[in-house]
Image (tube, rainbow, N blue to C red):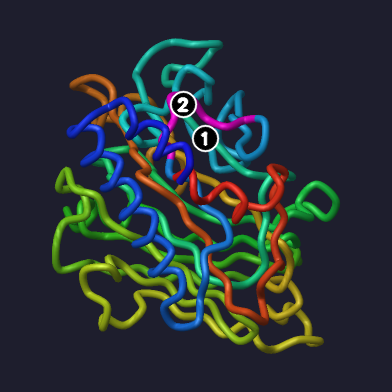
Amino acid sequence: MQDNLHILSWLGKAGFIAGLLAILFHFNVALAGVANGYRIVWADEFNGNKLDTKHTWNIETGNGGSGNNELEYNSKRSVTVEDGCLILTARREFFKGRNFTSGRVNTMHKFTFKHGMIEARVKIPATSNGLWPAFWLMGENFSSVGWPQCGEIDIFEMGNGDGIKISSQDRYFNGACHWGYYENGSYPNYFHAVNNNYSLQDGKFHTFTLVWDDDSVSMYLDRDTYPNNPPYYHFDISEKGKKWAAGDYFHNQMFIIFDLAVGGYFTGITSGDGITALDAGHSEMMVDYVRVYQKDNEYQSYFWKGGNYSDLSMNL
């Protein structure tokens, strides 16, 4: 707030209005966090002109896929911050042996949390055919126990091959959980897809929310606009102690990932000839913000390399 007041002193009337709106925006964020017993513990509003790679984000580079047979090379050039948004850009271009480039970022070892509510406001590109945008979490213990034992929560994914088959890519999306360990070539997971009643690739931002507690994970679409809508995904994680019991894998610190993949098994397209979404040029996935809230009994169940978010939140 002090920074805003210094700015007001020399920007005049226009600056006063702009500054006042910024302050009101901050209080709206704070009030939203208090609702239903939650308070905001961390957020990235992407208000600067570059990604905070010192305290928060890692920009992944290299061949995409992690076993998913994706076609892109993830590059730093494909990750930018402009006009208050994180932007991941997919391009059809030959780079380091790949015919496509795109962007993927994560908060591993820099920001993690356990339980609470996380939401992101995202503008999703047209995925038809071959783009695979996603917002997801993975266990911070990934580097020590590997996948899927670390646990994975996919808050939203689009571009699935089943959506292509029914010509509903702009409305067909899913949530998913993966956990456990491989046995006889398989591992436990729960995937649930929805054919939404309106487009999510309409050039507008849409809000995706995960509520995660001791008992379950629940995911909601556009809760800011439709607060009474039921979750599009719900999964019980209370059971523990049995073989592949989900509760043994989803009560650990997790980190955030945003990515815009090109092709892969998920899309059903593993050849560049099938990627038509980039025929007209590049495509962008835009993230307006990502925010994490927790209740009192969950408070402090997070880690941020930048310190205490509450010390900085008045500078939003």
Q: Does the magenta stretch include residue 49?
A: yes
Q: Where is residue 36 in the image (x, y as percent from the top left)?
A: 44, 83
Query: Can residue 22 be seen at all in this image of the molecule?
Result: yes
Label 2 – label 1 distance at C-alpha: 7 Å
Q: Which amino acid does label 2 sit on?
A: Val
Taking the spot 34% from the left edge, 62% from the top edge, the residue there is 28
Q: Position of residue 258 (x, y in %)?
A: 49, 44
Question: Label 1 is placed on what type of residue?
Answer: Arg
Q: In which quarter of the image is the C terminus?
A: top left
- Marks 1 and 2: in contact by CB < 8 Å? yes
Q: Nearer the viewer, residue 45 or 23?
A: 23
Residue placed at 30% from the left, 71% from the top? 223
The residue that mark 2 highlights is: 79
Specify start and end residues of the magenta stretch as a single range: 46-53
| Residue 146 percent across, percent down from the top left | 78, 52
Above or below, comparing residue 15 to residue 298 in the picture:
above
List the residue tagged with mark 1.
104
* 269, 50: nearer the viewer: 50
